Image (spheres, rainbow, N blue to C red):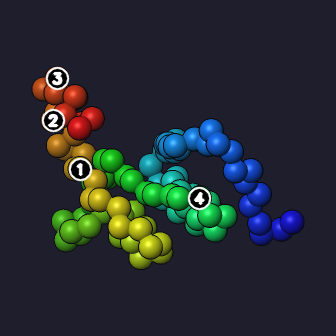
Amino acid sequence: MKGTLNVAKQTTAAKALFVAPTALNSGLTSICLGLVRALDSVGLRVGFCKPVSQPREAGDAVDRSIHFARAKTNLNPPQPIALKYAQRLMSQQQGELLLE
């Protein structure tokens, strides 16, 4: 059927799905929000999280992906950590802090 998503509900359904980009500006946010909408429409609980933000314009207070997710869904995802902060932690061998 065109325009429908058939999902078999299982007792051992995945608890998380991680989608990673293959390149910058590859449309990952659009794909993920499409998945959120499709899965939500069939009754599955969904969320959206962007762990690390891309560099953004100086005037942007909220990451564009997070702004888009909040505007187009009923979700309120947390603000991601800044890329420079993540890079600093990794260079200082403090990658475990990124996992908290």
Q: Which residue is mark 1?
A: 81
Per the model, the C-alpha gap separating discs 2 and 4 is: 37 Å
Mark earlier in primary sequence (4, 3): 4
Q: Residue at image x 47%, y 72%?
A: 73
Total labels: the figure holds 4
Q: Residues within 10 Å of mark 3 (few under 14, many from 20)?
A: few
Mark earlier in primary sequence (2, 4): 4
Q: Position of residue 72 (x, y in %)?
A: 47, 75
Q: Are the residues at dot 1 and dot 3 in contact (C-beta closer than 8 Å)?
A: no
Q: Residues within 10 Å of mark 2 (few under 14, many from 20)?
A: few
Q: Are the residues at dot 4 and dot 1 in contact (C-beta closer than 8 Å)?
A: no
Q: Which residue is mark 2?
A: 88
Q: Which residue is mark 3?
A: 93
Amino acid, disc 1:
Ile
As helix, strand or loop, the secondary structure at mark 4 comes to: loop
Q: Residues within 10 Å of mark 1 (few under 14, many from 20)?
A: some
Q: Quadrant of residue 96?
A: top left
Q: Which residue is mark 4?
A: 44
Amino acid, disc 4:
Leu
User: Of 41 and 19, which appears nearest the observer?
Assistant: 41
Q: Position of residue 64 (x, y in %)?
A: 35, 66
Amino acid, disc 3:
Gln
